[in-house]
Image (cartoon, rainbow, N blue to C red):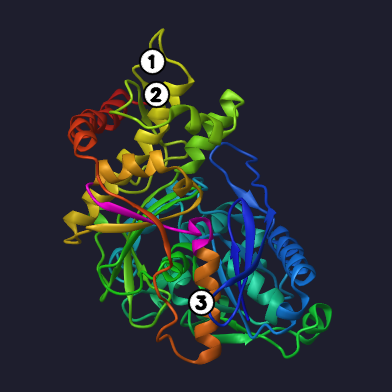
Amino acid sequence: MYIGLDIGTSSVKAILLNEDQDLISSQTAELTVERPHPGWSEQDPESWWLACETVLDALKARAPAEFAAVKAIGLSGHMHGATLLDAAGKPLRPCILWNDGRSGAQCAELEAREPGFLTLGGNRVMPGFTAPKLQWVRENEPDVFAKTKMVVLPKDYVRFKLTGEYVGDMSDSAGTLWLDVAKRDWSVKLLAATGLTRDNMPRLVEGSEISGTVTGDLCSRWCFEAPPVVAGGGGDNAASACGVGAVEPGSAFVSLGTSGVLFVTNSAFSPNVESAVHAFCHAVPETWHQMGVILSATDSLNWLSKTLNTPASELTGALGKVDGPSPVSFLPYLGGERTPHNDVKIRAGFYGISHETDNTALTHAVLDGVAFALKDCLEALSVAGTQVDRVLAVGGGSRSDTWLEIIASILGVSVDVPIDGDFGASLGAARLAQAAALGETRGVFERPALKTSIDPNPTLTQSYAEAYSQWRNLYPAIKQAGF
């Protein structure tokens, strides 16, 4: 038996799999995000652990015999979160999350002062990454910075609570900007640029390797027959790739979660900093990946749902199938954007609203706008020489066939939909756990069973091509106007 734990932004998900990777049970516990100032996004690290306790307790109650036989636990989590711990392993402040935009000034300064972030780190210095967050703390909270003994990522704080050890994996750690991504090791030079050393960093393992074992106290609490090992795991997107079998070079997936991701597996480190493409280590050895990332995918739909006081499922259900683009355009930049703009200050907006505009038109515009932003990601990957012909869809947004048909038609690629698309990262974490327990990756990361495949609709592809060209003019127009 194997457990996959996914520490997401809005919830912690846990699944229990048997040796054949059949789902025995799944549990979810909700999380909240605090926004104490405009552009800030924080979470209490202890809330992750409390949520993990909740879902593991629930798994044990639902399937006690299977739970007791667990051999390994795998971890995935939202990337880049700056979790600062003191000498006793206690959080010194709330975690600064991936979608926090406060460190824009620090990004510009670090990128100008240390070009190694672009070469060794392989990515533009963006507020979402961990390194500029620490520089912000160094400049604005010097007392906290002085007390910081260890910097870990969200899932690795959960690992510390499970095992008592500070360990990180390659895929998640690449998103800190302190990793020499090609060498898969911490860079002393990049750490020094933010006043840190190797002593402030966890030990590194591959995602499919053993990082430690569950402590005796927790084994007693959960009645495990033997102490489960804990796999290295991966950042949420790399773990999702493991969950949908995207571990071979050229395999790809699109994630419609809080953020949106177009992910392609590579055989080598392939950065493209000019277009703000993310180039990271994969969660499996000797493999890397590229990502185009947008910050507000289902977050855009959830914002509209809250604003209109109507459930998102009701909004998309009322829309039904579409026969062309919405007459209204939407820029999904609620908290800035990464690929391809790397612009923390840009904000979302509608264009083309008229007296006739209703909830359906606004919903349609949001789905279109997110799909157009993913098209931007595809264009950025194409500039880097990466071709995508087919993707798997994961995340909560993959439950909308209408949205997926829009995406398939705009991107010009076929979209495969796994049966359990909402469990991509937790499934990948469980698979990494199995690989760690078995000591090999062969046969572990198979493609999941598909619910359906959605091909581009030629009529939609043609009509959306013109709409995309017009939509792309909105960003530069807004920037030129100074908004």
Residue 210 vs residue 28, the one in the foreground: 28
Q: Can residue 175 be seen from the camera position used here?
A: no
Q: Secondary structure at mark 3?
A: helix
Please report the residue visible at 76 percent of the width from the left and 65 percent of the height from the top.
58
Please report the residue visible at 61 percent of the width from the left and 63 percent of the height from the top.
83
Determine contact: label 1, label 2, CB under 8 Å. yes
The percent coordinates of residue 475 (x first, y second) are 29, 32
Q: Which residues are magenta?
A: 412-424
Instruction: Choose the circle earlier in sequence order: 2 or 3.
Output: 2
Name the disc covering residue 268, or none.
Answer: none
The Cα atoms of the two marked residues, 2 and 3, are separated by 41 Å
Membership of 325 in magenta stretch:
no
The percent coordinates of residue 158 (x first, y second) are 66, 70
Please report the residue visible at 44 percent of the width from the left and 62 percent of the height from the top.
237
The Cα atoms of the two marked residues, 1 and 2, are separated by 7 Å
Name the disc covering residue 353, or none.
Answer: 1
Please report the residue visible at 29 percent of the width from the left and 67 percent of the height from the top.
251
Amino acid of disc 1:
Ile
**Placement of 57 over or under 296, stated as above or below:** below
Q: Secondary structure at mark 1?
A: loop
478 relative to 309 in the view: left or right = left
Q: Nearer the viewer, mark 1 or mark 3?
A: 3
Amino acid of disc 2:
Phe
Say which residue label 2 marks: 350
Instruction: Choose the circle earlier in sequence order: 1 or 3.
Output: 1
